[in-house]
Amino acid sequence: QVQISESGGGSVQAGGSLRLSCTSSGMIMCMGWFRQAPGKEREGVAAIWPIVGSALYNPSVKGRFTVSQDEAKTTVYLNLDSLKPEDTAMYYCATDRRCPMYGERALDQHTYHTWGQGTQVTVSS
Protein backbone atom coordinates (compact mmCIF):
# COMPACT_ATOMS: atom_id res chain seq x y z
CA GLN A 1 0.00 0.00 0.00
CA VAL A 2 1.30 3.44 -0.90
CA GLN A 3 2.45 5.65 1.95
CA ILE A 4 2.18 9.43 1.96
CA SER A 5 3.60 12.09 4.22
CA GLU A 6 3.10 15.85 4.54
CA SER A 7 5.63 18.54 5.32
CA GLY A 8 5.92 22.31 5.16
CA GLY A 9 3.54 23.53 7.82
CA GLY A 10 4.42 26.35 10.18
CA SER A 11 3.37 29.65 11.73
CA VAL A 12 2.89 32.79 9.67
CA GLN A 13 1.17 36.13 10.00
CA ALA A 14 -2.01 36.94 8.14
CA GLY A 15 -1.30 37.67 4.50
CA GLY A 16 1.69 35.36 4.47
CA SER A 17 2.34 32.20 2.47
CA LEU A 18 3.32 28.60 3.03
CA ARG A 19 3.99 25.66 0.77
CA LEU A 20 2.90 22.24 1.88
CA SER A 21 4.26 19.08 0.30
CA CYS A 22 2.86 15.59 0.22
CA THR A 23 5.31 12.91 -0.84
CA SER A 24 4.20 9.46 -1.90
CA SER A 25 6.04 6.15 -2.07
CA GLY A 26 4.46 5.60 -5.48
CA MET A 27 3.02 7.55 -8.39
CA ILE A 28 0.06 9.69 -7.38
CA MET A 29 -3.07 9.15 -9.46
CA CYS A 30 -5.25 11.44 -7.36
CA MET A 31 -4.84 13.36 -4.16
CA GLY A 32 -6.98 15.43 -1.88
CA TRP A 33 -5.89 18.06 0.60
CA PHE A 34 -7.97 18.46 3.73
CA ARG A 35 -7.83 20.52 6.87
CA GLN A 36 -9.27 20.24 10.33
CA ALA A 37 -9.45 23.01 12.88
CA PRO A 38 -10.05 22.24 16.56
CA GLY A 39 -13.69 21.44 17.19
CA LYS A 40 -14.56 21.46 13.50
CA GLU A 41 -15.24 18.86 10.85
CA ARG A 42 -12.49 17.92 8.44
CA GLU A 43 -13.08 19.77 5.18
CA GLY A 44 -11.78 19.28 1.69
CA VAL A 45 -9.54 22.08 0.45
CA ALA A 46 -8.34 20.93 -2.96
CA ALA A 47 -7.93 17.86 -5.11
CA ILE A 48 -5.66 17.05 -8.01
CA TRP A 49 -5.38 14.39 -10.69
CA PRO A 50 -1.70 14.65 -11.69
CA ILE A 51 -1.89 12.42 -14.77
CA VAL A 52 -4.58 14.51 -16.44
CA GLY A 53 -3.55 17.80 -14.85
CA SER A 54 -6.93 18.66 -13.34
CA ALA A 55 -7.50 20.41 -10.04
CA LEU A 56 -10.53 21.24 -7.94
CA TYR A 57 -10.84 23.76 -5.11
CA ASN A 58 -13.14 24.48 -2.23
CA PRO A 59 -14.67 27.92 -2.96
CA SER A 60 -13.37 29.15 0.40
CA VAL A 61 -9.76 28.88 -0.80
CA LYS A 62 -10.07 29.31 -4.56
CA GLY A 63 -7.76 32.06 -5.75
CA ARG A 64 -5.57 31.81 -2.65
CA PHE A 65 -4.49 28.16 -2.65
CA THR A 66 -2.89 26.35 -5.59
CA VAL A 67 -2.32 22.62 -5.93
CA SER A 68 0.36 21.23 -8.23
CA GLN A 69 2.61 18.21 -8.70
CA ASP A 70 6.24 17.47 -9.54
CA GLU A 71 7.27 15.89 -12.85
CA ALA A 72 7.65 12.44 -11.32
CA LYS A 73 4.12 12.73 -9.92
CA THR A 74 5.28 11.45 -6.55
CA THR A 75 4.96 14.79 -4.76
CA VAL A 76 1.97 17.10 -4.66
CA TYR A 77 2.23 20.67 -3.43
CA LEU A 78 -0.33 22.96 -1.87
CA ASN A 79 0.67 26.61 -2.05
CA LEU A 80 -1.15 28.69 0.55
CA ASP A 81 -1.18 32.42 -0.21
CA SER A 82 -2.95 35.38 1.40
CA LEU A 83 -3.40 33.31 4.52
CA LYS A 84 -6.07 34.24 7.04
CA PRO A 85 -6.38 33.32 10.72
CA GLU A 86 -9.35 31.11 9.80
CA ASP A 87 -6.98 28.99 7.69
CA THR A 88 -5.39 27.77 10.91
CA ALA A 89 -5.76 23.99 11.01
CA MET A 90 -4.02 20.66 10.69
CA TYR A 91 -3.62 19.97 6.99
CA TYR A 92 -3.71 16.44 5.60
CA CYS A 93 -3.15 14.90 2.22
CA ALA A 94 -5.00 11.76 1.22
CA THR A 95 -5.16 9.36 -1.69
CA ASP A 96 -6.90 6.16 -2.67
CA ARG A 97 -6.49 3.24 -5.05
CA ARG A 98 -9.88 4.08 -6.51
CA CYS A 99 -9.72 7.68 -7.60
CA PRO A 100 -12.87 9.77 -7.57
CA MET A 101 -14.14 11.49 -10.67
CA TYR A 102 -13.87 15.26 -10.87
CA GLY A 103 -16.56 16.58 -8.58
CA GLU A 104 -17.72 16.93 -5.00
CA ARG A 105 -16.63 13.44 -3.97
CA ALA A 106 -13.02 14.48 -4.51
CA LEU A 107 -13.38 16.88 -1.57
CA ASP A 108 -15.14 14.35 0.65
CA GLN A 109 -12.87 12.77 3.26
CA HIS A 110 -14.76 9.46 3.05
CA THR A 111 -13.53 9.03 -0.54
CA TYR A 112 -9.95 8.43 0.60
CA HIS A 113 -8.47 5.60 2.63
CA THR A 114 -4.78 6.47 2.73
CA TRP A 115 -3.83 9.48 4.81
CA GLY A 116 -0.73 11.31 5.88
CA GLN A 117 -0.02 12.24 9.48
CA GLY A 118 -0.84 15.91 8.99
CA THR A 119 1.10 19.15 9.21
CA GLN A 120 0.04 22.14 11.32
CA VAL A 121 -0.60 25.56 9.80
CA THR A 122 -1.07 28.46 12.21
CA VAL A 123 -1.93 31.96 10.98
CA SER A 124 -1.80 34.84 13.43
CA SER A 125 -3.61 38.14 12.98
Image (cartoon, helix red, strand yellow):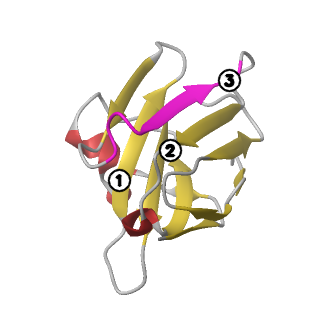
Q: Is residue 5 above or below residue 80?
A: below
The 10 Å Cα crowd at callout 2, few under 14, some 14 to 19, many 20 or more, is: some
Query: Would you name the residue on which mark 3 appears?
Result: 73
In space, the residues marked 2 and 3 are separated at their CA atoms by: 15 Å
Residue at numbered disc 1? 44
Disc 1 or 2, which lies upstream in sequence?
Answer: 1
| Amino acid bearing label 1 | Gly
Question: Height in image: 54 above or below 121?
Answer: above
Dot 3, crowdedness within 10 Å: few (<14), some or many (≥20)?
some
- Amino acid carrying label 2: it is Asp
Task: Assign a secondary structure to mark 2.
Answer: loop
Q: For this view, does 112 lie left or right of residue 71?
A: left
Q: Is residue 62 magenta?
A: yes
User: Residue drawn at (62%, 36%), measured in percent from left and top?
Assistant: 77
- Tell me residue 43's x, y (percent): 33, 61
Q: Circle 2 is placed at which residue position?
A: 96
Q: Within 10 Å of the Cα at label 1, are there few (<14), some (14-19), or many (20+) other Cα atoms?
A: many
State if disc 3 and disc 1 touch (CB < 8 Å): no
Most foreground residue, 11 or 118: 11
Q: Which residues are magenta?
A: 61-70
Q: Is residue 7 magenta?
A: no
Of callouts 1 and 3, which one flags the residue occurring earlier in the amino acid sequence? 1
Residue 68 on image: x %, y %: 56, 27
Label 2 vs 3, first from the N-terminus: 3
**Type of amino acid at the residue the image marks with label 3:** Lys
The answer for how far apart the CA atoms under marks 1 and 2 are is 15 Å
